[in-house]
Image (cartoon, helix red, strand yellow):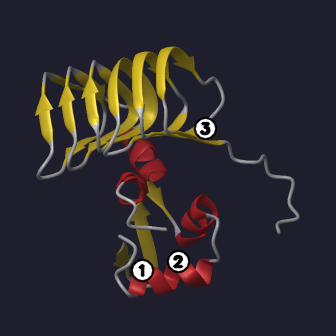
Amino acid sequence: MRNNKKKEEKILDVDASMQGNMIFRDPVNLRINGTFEGALITKGNLTIGENATVKADIKGEFITVAGNVIGDIEASRNLKIVPPAKVVGNVKTPVFSIAEGSVFEGKCHMLRGKDDKALSNKNVLTVDEVARYLEVDTSLILTWAREGKLPGSKDKDTWKFERATLDSWIANEKIK
């Protein structure tokens, strides 16, 4: 149990059929596993699970899509499309990756961040940041990284982890 006064992280896992507008003004880790139709505006991490079907325009910060999305997506920080995802719509984002086996049908507009270096630094996490993000001990993160169970790269004596890659692994339930 942690004794610091850090705000408790909000996690919402939606495995239902929903319609309407969902707006999150505070950062949240949102995962959609069911169906959703309407409009979706989030702060924080949004993951569209591989069994999800979303018919909505989406605005968010860090977005990972593994399911089906019909609608435009605007990610202010990062958009990652991972298999077996199918996205039909236009996207706007400064950082965009499409993994092999994913489908993207639409136009892409690459946004430029105010400070590209600062933006990329926010997408790269340290061992301590990953431990806080996954709510596990740092020694476990180091063990997982050395054993190849966690995607990361070693730069001299320091491990670095890309947030979007971690989110993809989580979306595909490779980290449990």
Query: Looking at the picture, how far across and down is residue 97, in whole percent?
Result: 22, 45
Q: Which is more toward the observer, 83 or 27?
A: 83
Residue type at mark 3 is Val
Could you tell me which residue is drawn at 61 percent across and 78 percent down?
Answer: 138
Residue type at mark 1 is Ala
Q: Which is more toward the observer, 125 or 112?
A: 125
Query: Which residue was labeled with disc 1?
Result: 145
Q: Earlier in the sequence, mark 1 or mark 3?
A: 3
Query: Looking at the picture, how far across and down is residue 41, in whole percent?
Result: 49, 21
Verify CB contact (< 8 Å) between mark 1 and mark 3.
no
Query: Looking at the picture, how far across and down is residue 94, in whole percent?
Result: 31, 34
Q: Earlier in the sequence, mark 3 or mark 2?
A: 3
| Location of residue 131 by image quarter | bottom right
Q: Disc 2 on helix, strand or loop?
A: helix
Is the residue marked by circle 1 packed among few (<14), some (14-19), or many (20+) residues within 10 Å?
some
> Is residue 111 something that shows in the picture?
no
Residue 23 lies, with reference to residue 173, above or below; the image says above
Q: Disc 3 on helix, strand or loop?
A: strand
Query: Which residue was labeled with disc 2?
Result: 141
